[in-house]
C-alpha cells in the first residue's frame, strides 16, 4: 500500500510536510512502516481542495487533510480498511462523497500527458520515473532512430510550442539541426513569469525527469551536447528537485558522456532567472543567461542561428518538453488524434480567480471554455455571475459569455482577441471592474517593460495613465480614441512579443466591455463598485439596526451613531476600504 | 540608499572574492554571482557591486545595470521579517490589494520600505504559484493563504 502526499507548493503551504511526518510516525508506531510507504509526490492539480492525500492501490482521494488527520487515516483506512468519509470530496451537486478522483467533475474531462506523472510518482526518485516508461523514449531515439526520424515524428505529431506563440516544435528542431556549428545548445525556458500561471513549476516539481529526458532527445536531434535550464530563482522547490533529478540521471548514465553506450553525450546545467517577465522572450532569455540585462534583440538572427554565446540554440518551454517522451513512446499518430485540426494534443491550464475549483488542469485542445469553467472548474464562486475569463496573462485578452462555446486552440483564441499564452486562466465575476483589470495588467507591463524600445517603454506608460484617469472618474470620450490608437501603434511597432501583445487587455476590454468604459466616463460610475474614487459607502437608515459592528471594524472611525440606532458614515473621513460593507450582516451598507 | 552605510570587513571581502572565484571570475556568470552575494549579505549595496565588478573584470555600470534590471535583486536591506504580498492576477482578483493596503496602514510603510526598527519590510511579488490559497502573503519563508484584511493583525502577532 502507498500513501501519496502532495508536495506541491500550494499544499506545502498548508502543512503537507507535517501530514507526511505524522503519517510516517503513526505507521511506525503501528509497525506498519515496512508495509506501507508514504510518498511525497508532485502536484495533483486540485489545489482548491488541498492538501491532498491519495491512498493506492484503491485510489482513495482525501481532500483538505490536516496534520492531525494522519492518525485517523492510518487507524481507519490502513488498518481497518474503512474509508474516512469526512475527508472525502463532497460532490457539490448530489452532496454525495466521492472516493475515486476519476468520478469527480474536476478530473472527468481531463487527459493528462504533460502532467502524466504529477501526483503519481516521487519526483525525487528516478526509479519511479523509469517504472512509468521513463527514459524509454530516449533509449529508443538514440539506439533505433536517426535524428531526422525523430524530428519527422515530432513534426507529424503536430506539437506546437506551449510557451505562448505556438510555433511548430518539430520545425524549430529541424532548423536548429541544420545549422552547423562546433557547439549547439538546448535551452529550456522555465522562467514562468505570467502572474497566475504555475504549470511549468508543477511539471518541474512533480516530474523533473520528463524534461531532462526530452532535452536529451532534443540534443540528439539537433546535435547539441549541452543543455541549459533557465529557471526562476523564485521557485526554490523546483530548483531543488531538478538538481536531484540531474544528479540521479548522471549516476544512471542517462546524462553525461556515452549515454547508454551509444557514444551520444549530453549534459545539463541550471541558469537562474532573477525576476524579469521579458526574459520569457527567447532572445532576452539568452542574454540573461549570458549574465546581461534581459533585453530582447531583433530577430533574425533567430536563436537557431545565433543563440547562446552566438551558437545555434533551441529554446522550448517546460510543458513542450514534457510532451516529447510520450509522443516518441506512443507515436505521432496517437498524439495527433487528440485536439483540433491545427492544434494537436492537450494543454495545461492554471485555473484561478473567482472559480470554485482552483487548480491545474490538462484538457484536449478544442475543449470549450464552458466545459473548463463550469464542469471542471465547478462554476463561479459564491454563486455569482460569470463575467469574463482572462487567458494568456498580461499578453492575452478578456473573453466573455459569447466566447464560452468556442473550442479553445491557438488560432481560435487569437481570432477572439486573446491568445493561448502559457495557459493562465483567470476567471472574473460581476464584482470585477474591467477597466481596473486592464489597468492592473498595464501596471504590470509598465513595470516589466525592459525599456529598450520607445513604443513599449513610453506607450504603455501613457496607456496606464489614461486608464488611471478613467478609473478616477476624469476620463473623456477622447481618451477612448487615444487608447485605441496608441494600442495599435504599440502593437505594430514594438520590438518583441511583450510590447506587441501588451495592449491586448486594453483592446479586448474595449471591444467586450465598452459600456463599462462609458459608465466610468459619462456617468462617473463604476458598475462593479471597484473604483474607489467613484464610489461612496452609505448606510441605509431603514435597514440599519445599530449593531455597531461597522463602527467597530472601521479603521479610521468614520462611522458614528448610538447603539441600536441607525449609524452614518462621514464620507470626508471614509477611506473606502470596504471593511464595513463586508462586516454588515443586515445588508444595510450599500455602494453609491 | 545613500543613508545606509555599508562596509565590508576583511572576512566578508574574502568570502565575496571566493564566490567570484567559484564561478571562474567569468563575466557571463554575473547573475549567478549576484544571487550568491545577495544570499550572503541579504542585499547588494554599492560596495559589494564594486568588488564584484573588479573580480569579474567588468565595469561597475554593467553590474549596476544588471542589479537594477532584475526585480529579485535589491540594493536596500530587507527587514528581519520581510513581508511579501502576492500581486499575481489570481490574488489580485481575490482582494490582494486590500490586504496590501491594510499592511501599509498598520505598519505605516510603503512598498519597498522597512520599519525604523528593522523588523518588517514590505514588498510585492508576482505569483508564488499557490493560487488555490489566494490571496497569499509570505512572511520570510512562511506562506499564509486566504488572507483577509482583518486577518493582517493576526499575522503580525506571530512575529511580536
Image (cartoon, helix red, strand yellow):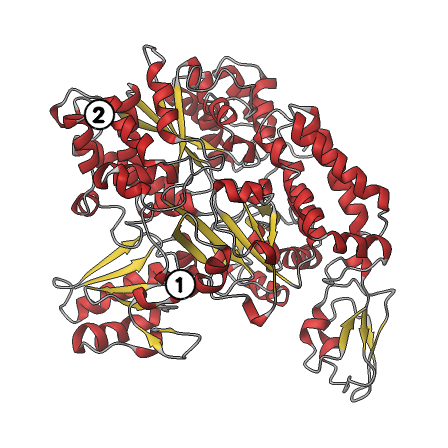
Q: Quadrant of the C terminus of chain A?
A: bottom right
| Badge 1 element | helix
Instruction: Examine the image and state in which quarter residue B25 appears.
Output: top left
Mark found first going from the N terminus, 1 or 2: 1
Counting from the top left corner in percent of width and height, residue A294 is at 54, 26
Query: What residue lies at 81% left-to-right and 46% top-to-bottom?
Result: A469
Q: Which residue is mark 1?
A: A106
Instruction: Examine the image and state in which quarter residue A547 appears.
Output: bottom right
- Depth check: give the residue in front, A126 or B44: A126
Q: Nearer the viewer, mark 1 or mark 2?
A: 1
Residue A270 visible from this viewpoint: no
Q: Which residue is mark 2?
A: A256
Callouts 1 and 2 close, C-beta under 8 Å:
no
Query: What residue lies at 27% left-to-right and 43% top-to-bottom?
Result: A334
From the viewer's perspective, tell me whether residue A479 is left or right of residue B142.
right
| Furthest residue in direction bottom, as rendered | A564
Counting from the top left corner in percent of width and height, residue A259 is at 17, 26
Instruction: Examine the image and state in which quarter residue A77 appears.
Output: bottom left
From the viewer's perspective, tell me whether residue A225 is left or right of residue B79.
left
Query: What residue lies at 53% left-to-right and 20% top-to-bottom?
Result: B51
The chain ID associated with circle 2 is A
Amino acid at each position: 500500500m502507498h500513501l501519496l502526499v502532495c508536495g506541491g507548493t500550494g499544499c506545502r503551504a498548508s502543512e503537507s510536510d507535517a501530514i507526511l511526518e505524522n503519517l510516517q510516525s503513526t505507521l511506525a508506531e503501528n509497525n506498519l512502516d515496512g508495509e506501507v510507504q508514504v510518498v511525497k509526490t508532485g502536484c495533483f492539480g486540485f489545489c482548491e481542495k488541498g492538501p491532498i492525500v491519495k491512498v493506492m492501490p484503491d485510489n482513495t482521494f482525501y481532500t483538505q487533510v490536516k496534520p492531525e488527520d494522519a492518525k485517523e487515516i492510518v487507524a481507519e483506512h490502513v488498518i481497518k480498511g474503512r474509508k474516512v468519509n469526512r475527508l472525502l470530496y463532497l460532490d457539490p451537486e448530489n452532496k454525495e462523497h466521492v472516493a475515486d478522483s476519476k468520478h469527480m467533475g474536476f478530473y472527468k474531462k481531463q487527459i493528462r500527458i504533460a502532467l502524466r506523472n504529477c501526483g503519481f510518482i516521487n519526483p525525487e526518485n528516478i526509479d519511479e520515473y523509469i517504472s512509468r516508461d521513463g527514459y524509454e523514449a530516449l533509449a529508443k531515439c538514440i539506439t533505433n532512430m536517426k535524428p531526422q526520424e525523430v524530428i519527422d515524428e515530432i513534426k507529424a505529431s503536430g506539437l506546437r510550442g506551449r510557451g505562448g506563440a505556438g510555433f511548430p516544435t518539430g520545425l524549430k528542431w529541424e532548423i536548429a539541426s541544420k545549422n552547423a556549428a562546433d557547439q549547439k545548445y538546448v535551452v529550456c525556458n522555465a522562467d514562468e513569469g505570467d502572474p497566475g500561471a504555475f504549470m511549468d513549476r508543477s511539471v518541474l516539481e512533480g516530474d523533473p525527469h520528463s524534461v531532462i529526458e526530452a532535452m536529451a532527445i532534443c540534443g540528439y536531434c539537433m546535435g547539441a551536447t549541452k543543455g541549459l535550464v533557465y529557471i526562476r530563482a523564485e521557485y526554490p522547490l523546483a530548483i531543488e528537485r531538478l538538481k536531484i533529478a540531474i544528479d540521479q540521471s548522471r549516476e544512471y548514465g542517462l546524462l553525461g558522456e556515452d549515454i547508454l553506450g551509444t557514444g551520444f553525450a549530453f549534459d545539463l546545467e541550471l541558469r537562474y532567472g532573477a525576476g524579469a517577465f521579458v526574459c520569457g522572450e527567447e532572445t532576452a532569455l539568452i542574454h540573461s543567461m549570458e549574465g546581461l540585462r534581459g533585453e530582447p534583440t531583433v530577430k533574425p538572427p533567430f536563436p537557431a542561428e545565433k543563440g547562446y554565446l552566438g551558437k545555434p540554440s533551441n529554446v522550448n518551454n517546460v510543458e513542450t518538453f514534457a510532451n516529447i517522451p510520450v509522443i516518441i513512446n506512443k507515436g505521432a499518430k496517437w498524439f495527433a488524434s487528440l485536439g483540433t485540426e491545427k492544434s494537436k494534443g492537450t494543454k495545461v491550464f492554471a485555473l484561478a480567480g473567482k472559480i470554485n475549483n482552483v487548480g491545474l488542469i490538462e484538457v484536449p485542445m478544442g475543449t470549450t471554455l464552458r466545459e473548463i469553467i463550469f464542469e471542471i472548474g465547478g462554476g463561479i464562486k459564491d454563486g455569482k455571475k460569470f463575467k469574463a475569463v482572462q487567458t494568456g496573462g498580461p499578453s492575452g485578452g478578456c473573453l466573455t459569455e459569447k466566447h464560452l462555446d468556442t473550442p479553445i486552440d491557438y488560432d481560435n483564441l487569437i481570432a477572439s482577441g486573446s491568445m493561448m499564452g502559457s495557459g493562465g486562466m483567470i476567471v472574473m465575476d460581476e464584482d470585477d471592474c474591467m477597466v481596473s483589470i486592464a489597468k492592473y495588467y498595464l501596471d504590470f507591463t509598465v513595470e516589466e517593460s525592459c525599456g529598450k524600445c520607445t513604443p513599449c517603454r513610453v506607450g504603455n506608460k501613457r496607456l496606464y495613465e489614461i486608464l488611471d484617469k478613467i478609473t478616477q472618474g476624469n476620463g473623456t470620450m477622447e481618451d477612448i480614441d487615444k487608447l485605441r490608437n496608441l494600442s495599435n501603434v504599440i502593437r505594430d511597432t514594438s520590438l518583441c512579443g511583450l510590447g506587441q501583445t501588451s495592449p491586448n487587455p486594453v483592446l479586448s476590454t474595449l471591444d467586450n466591455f465598452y459600456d463599462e468604459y462609458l459608465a466610468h466616463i459619462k456617468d462617473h460610475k463604476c458598475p462593479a463598485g471597484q473604483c474607489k474614487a467613484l464610489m461612496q459607502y452609505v448606510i441605509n437608515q431603514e435597514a440599519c439596526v445599530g449593531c455597531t459592528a461597522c463602527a467597530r471594524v472601521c479603521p479610521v472611525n468614520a462611522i458614528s451613531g448610538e447603539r441600536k440606532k441607525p449609524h452614518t458614515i462621514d464620507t470626508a473621513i471614509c477611506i473606502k476600504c470596504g471593511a464595513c460593507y463586508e462586516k454588515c450582516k443586515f445588508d444595510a451598507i450599500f455602494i453609491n | 540608499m545613500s543613508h545606509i552605510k555599508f562596509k565590508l570587513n576583511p572576512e566578508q571581502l574574502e568570502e565575496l572574492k571566493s564566490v567570484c572565484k567559484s564561478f571562474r571570475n567569468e563575466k557571463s556568470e554575473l547573475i549567478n554571482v549576484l544571487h550568491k552575494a545577495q544570499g550572503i549579505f541579504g542585499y547588494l549595496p554599492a560596495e559589494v557591486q564594486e568588488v564584484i565588478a573588479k573580480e569579474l573584470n567588468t565595469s561597475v555600470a554593467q553590474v549596476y545595470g544588471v542589479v537594477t534590471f532584475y526585480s529579485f535583486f535589491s540594493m536596500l536591506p530587507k527587514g528581519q521579517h520581510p513581508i511579501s504580498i502576492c500581486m499575481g492576477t489570481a490574488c489580485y482578483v481575490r482582494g490582494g490589494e486590500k490586504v496590501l493596503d491594510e499592511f501599509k496602514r498598520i505598519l505605516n510603510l510603503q512598498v519597498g520600505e522597512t520599519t525604523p526598527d528593522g523588523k518588517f519590510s514590505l514588498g510585492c511579488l508576482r505569483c508564488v504559484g499557490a493560487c488555490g490559497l489566494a490571496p497569499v502573503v509570505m512572511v520570510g519563508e512562511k506562506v499564509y493563504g486566504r488572507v483577509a484584511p482583518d486577518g493582517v493583525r493576526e499575522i503580525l502577532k506571530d512575529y511580536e
